Image: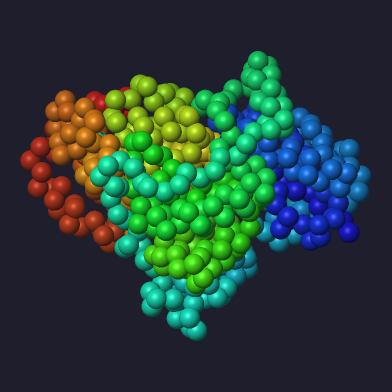
């Protein structure tokens, strides 16, 4: 049996053919020199890799080197590797003589199945229809040929505003216990920082699984105690509770620690055997085998230049306060809290990402490619394949709608409805002009005014555009936002 080279995001047992298969693991320091990663993300990657090496013992050759190339020169035998997760890594392994590249693992659907589905379609490749195909193909949540409950999606039941008392009554997810490996990682990162390697964000306790055992424990706890509340509140934001009922498993999936199909089947069992609410179960399954697989596949299916799409002509670079996660420079309560969450945890859930961070960047005209890089390096679950679709295709509308039917842009009214942020803010979500004008509300109208000729007429925006044309203070709002520029709001 050939030795299987596992990248640091291919760490679970489902990346091996046999429990006893020989393994190669490489820790490359150059990865951390090339980009400014969040300190907690660097910690998680190194911790997961070293935990896997410790688990495998003599079964694995574990090499620490400056680069992958230097490490590979020490291994003489033929190697095989599962399809890597970035275009750069795929090109690198394909260039190596001794390495056989195998099909991808770690997703519910295969690249071939997606390509067959996509090739057979005319028009846009929407997540909703891919998700139906995937459910059908893998017989998930079906009764005979039909979706359980008669509907494919319960999305409309997944948008409750947060509870009025600012708390969601669910048991907290168990946090991992750090061990000697984590202590060694922390000491090494301290040393690397003294050598001049830069990290973003604050160090903190490891909050995300670094082993398959930890990931499975978190999944079991989620299915038993948190899944029921996940569905209704998955879009809600609370200043005092960043986790709400989210599974906090995305990093474990993306490190390859947890097989997503295990989570999908577990959620289906929770519905069929324990009576978990269908809207929550379906909502979770849609995230895991719908959105996650769809984002993975579009990364490979669309042409490589898709990543640098910038059809709205966004020209501004990300400002320093954003790059440095300087939440204290920001007064706007929602943005302050979300940016502080990234700084302190390297994680916020999908709505703060999309409707606070992404929305703000879109309104300010920041370059999508820089934003991909920022999300990729600042989030524990960020990878090139994850952030290309989520940022370019979804949040920045930089391809004019290959994935979405309209830009994810909104004013303060959305944030006010879905969070408890606005009550404690110096700005007023209803105001677009003046010293207390909400930067999201003013930015919303200024964005629409600036992009009125670029947003396609069929983009479900006609009514909003007409409303904008009727605003008598639009020019003043545009001038105000131009002056605000990229300063922290
Ligand atoms: Fe955010 Fe505007 Fe609400 Fe303040 S008023 S919290 S800036 S949406």
Residue drawn at x 45%, y 81% as measured from the top left: 146
The one nearer the camera, 246 or 304, is 246
Q: Quadrant of residue 231?
A: bottom left
View quadrant of ligand 1: top left
24 vs 183, left or right, is: right
Q: Which residue is most to the right? A: 76
x then y, percent, for residue 83: 70, 55
The spot of residue 201 in percent (x, y) is 51, 27
| 332 sits to left or right of 182 | left
Q: What x and y, as percent, mark residue 60?
A: 84, 45
Side of 375 relative to 338 (left or right):
right
Q: Is residue 424 left or right of residue 372?
A: left
| Image quarter (top left, top right, bottom left or bottom right) of the C terminus | top left
Place of residue 385 in the rendered image (x, y in percent of width and height, measured from the top left): 56, 49
Can residue 31 be seen in the rendering of this structure?
no
Quadrant hosting residue 380: top right
Q: As drawn, which residue projects farthest toward the top?
A: 194
Whether residue 489 appears in this view of the structure is yes
The picture quadrant where one finds residue 47 is top right
Q: Nearer the viewer, residue 314 or 271?
A: 271
**Residue depicted at 82% across the width and 39% down the height:** 62
Q: Is residue 39 above or below residue 123?
A: above
For the point 41% across and 29% down, the residue is 340
Give the farthest residue toward the bottom: 144
Where does the N terminus fall, quadrant-wise? bottom right
Asked if 263 appears above or below 236 in the picture, the reply is below
Residue placed most toward the observer, 231 or 128? 231
- Residue closest to the eye, 248 or 464: 248
Q: Residue at x 78, y 41 (%)?
A: 53
């Amino acid at each position: 049996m050939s030795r299987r080279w596992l990248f640091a995001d291919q760490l679970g047992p489902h990346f091996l053919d046999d429990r006893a298969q020989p393994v190669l693991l490489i820790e490359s320091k150059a990865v951390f020199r090339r980009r400014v990663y969040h300190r907690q993300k660097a910690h998680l990657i190194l911790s997961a890799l070293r935990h896997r090496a410790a688990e495998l013992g003599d079964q694995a050759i574990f090499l620490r080197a400056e680069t992958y190339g230097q490490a590979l020169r020490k291994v003489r035998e033929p190697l095989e590797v599962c399809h890597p997760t970035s275009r750069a890594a795929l090109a690198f392994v394909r260039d190596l003589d001794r390495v056989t590249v195998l099909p991808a693992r770690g997703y519910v659907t295969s690249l071939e199945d997606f390509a067959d589905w996509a090739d057979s379609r005319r028009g846009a490749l929407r997540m909703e229809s891919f998700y139906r195909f995937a459910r059908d193909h893998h017989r998930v949540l079906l009764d005979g040929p039909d979706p359980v409950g008669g509907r494919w999606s319960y999305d409309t039941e997944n948008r409750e505003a947060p509870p009025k008392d600012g708390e969601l009554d669910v048991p907290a997810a168990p946090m991992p216990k750090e061990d000697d490996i984590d202590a060694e990682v922390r000491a090494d990162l301290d040393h690397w920082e003294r050598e001049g390697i830069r990290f973003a964000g604050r160090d903190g306790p490891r909050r995300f699984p670094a082993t398959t055992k930890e990931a499975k424990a978190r999944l079991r706890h989620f299915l038993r105690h948190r899944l029921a509340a996940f569905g209704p509140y998955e879009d809600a934001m609370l200043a005092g509770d960043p986790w709400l009922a989210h599974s906090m498993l995305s990093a474990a999936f993306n490190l390859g620690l947890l097989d997503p199909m295990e989570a999908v089947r577990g959620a289906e069992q929770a519905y069929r055997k324990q009576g978990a609410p269908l809207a929550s179960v379906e909502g979770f399954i849609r995230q895991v085998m719908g959105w996650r697989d769809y984002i993975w596949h579009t990364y490979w299916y669309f042409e490589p230049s898709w990543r640098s799409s910038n059809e709205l002509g966004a020209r501004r670079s990300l400002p320093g306060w954003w790059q440095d996660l300087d939440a204290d420079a920001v007064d706007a309560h929602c943005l302050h809290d979300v940016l502080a969450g990234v700084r302190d945890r390297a994680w916020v859930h999908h709505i703060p990402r999309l409707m606070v961070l992404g929305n703000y960047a879109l309104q300010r005209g920041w370059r999508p490619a820089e934003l991909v890089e920022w999300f990729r390096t600042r989030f524990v679950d960020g990878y090139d394949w994850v952030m290309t679709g989520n940022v370019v295709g979804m949040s920045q509308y930089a391809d004019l709608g290959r994935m979405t039917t309209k830009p994810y842009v909104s004013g303060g009214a959305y944030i006010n409805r879905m969070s408890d942020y606005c009550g404690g803010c110096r700005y007023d979500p209803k105001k677009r002009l003046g010293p207390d004008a909400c930067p999201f509300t003013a930015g919303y109208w200024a964005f629409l005014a600036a992009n009125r000729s670029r947003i396609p007429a069929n983009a479900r925006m006609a009514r909003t555009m007409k409303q904008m044309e009727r605003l008598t203070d639009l020019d003043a709002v545009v001038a105000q936002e131009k002056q605000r520029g990229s300063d922290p709001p």
